Amino acid sequence: MNHLFQYTIRLADNASILGHRLGELCGHGPILEQDIAMTNVALDLVGQARSFYQYAAEVEGANHTEDDLAYLRDNQDFRNLLLLEQPNGHFGDTIARQFLYDAYSFAFYQGLRKSKDATLAAIAEKAIKEVTYHLRWSSEWVVRLGDGTAESHAKIQAGLNSLWRYTGEMFEMDETDNQMLAQGIGVDLVLVKTAWLAKVNEVFAEATLTLPSDKTWMQKGSKKGIHTEHLGYILAEMQHLQRTYPGCEW
Amino acid sequence: MNNWPLWEIFIRSRQGLDHKHVGSLHAADAQMAIENARDVYTRRMEGVSIWAVESTNIHASNPDEADSLYEPSNDKPYRHPTFYDIPKEIGHM
């Protein structure tokens, strides 16, 4: 197995699928300013996805383009975290998902920027500036909703509780992760978890939210291509055009 | 979210230039106003600094009073420094 390809395609799919999810909110945000904020985050993520897909295509060496990888792979080939394919729900659900991921990717890219792989390190270096703002934005909203009204508090807490089951797999090291870490290319997810949990605890405390139980049953499978039912619907919409009109451009 | 106050946004596009009014937006408080301004008005690298002022704090002159406010200065050209020769060394003022 080409571990570097696997490693890169996971990062590409993470950014791509969450970018698509946020893109769905274009024109549907709760208020104009936040509609634009979420679309900005979506654009940053799609930009990151492109960089990772381009590199993945190069590493794969199978004459695929970034578009082939994004638009012509099937459900079981995608390697994005389960968390990121979850539906937008209401604004509190969207914020909960975003915060859990931003805190993760911020810590992850801090590690990846020191990668021995120059391309991954460069992509991480660029992404970290964007993610710093994403994390600031989503943390801010977790605090506003958590420490807001009784209704907003209940809604964001419920959103976080129901998404918590997808946070376990973010820190699981499989063979690809271990190989990449051993070669100084990948990131130690144990360290990422420590940083992530510290950020989550800090923001939850300010937001008067309760950390979901550590006995929560954790869903996993994305690293093997086993997804929740939601991914298929995303791909159907995302890939529809390329599959109906192969090679279509504008 | 419908009763958030309105804010006027001023952006300085480059070091050394003045902040210019770019538009307005809604936000719950000053911090959110700055963040919203970042997302709404600096997406194409327009700025290096943002000011947000709650619109209710801006007091404007009345356009109906334009005659009495501005008309009187129209016939006083001596208030413009156009009667002086500016030495070349000073350059553009």
Image: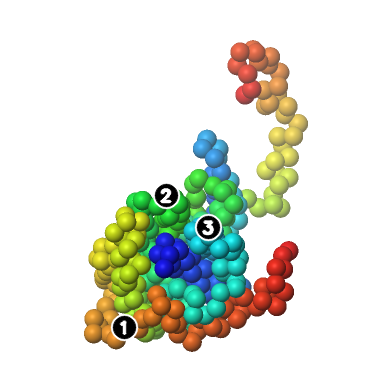
Q: CA distance from mark 3 to mark 1?
A: 34 Å
The C terminus of chain A is located in which quarter? bottom right
Task: Say which residue appears at 49% left-offset and 46% top-offset.
Answer: B49
Q: Which mark is residue A58?
A: 3
In front of the other: A103 or A226:
A226
Q: CA distance from mark 1 to mark 2?
A: 34 Å
**Crowd rating for badge 1 (residues with CA inside 10 Å; few <14, some 14–19, many 20+):** few
**Crowd rating for badge 2 (residues with CA inside 10 Å; few <14, some 14–19, many 20+):** few
**Crowd rating for badge 3 (residues with CA inside 10 Å; few <14, some 14–19, many 20+):** some
Q: Which mark is residue A218?
A: 1
Give the side of residue A222 with respect to residue B59, left or right.
left
Q: Which mark is residue A118?
A: 2
Task: Provide the secondary structure element on which disc 1 rests.
Answer: loop
Q: Amino acid at mark 2?
A: Ala
Q: Which mark is residue A18?
A: none
Q: Amino acid at mark 3?
A: Glu
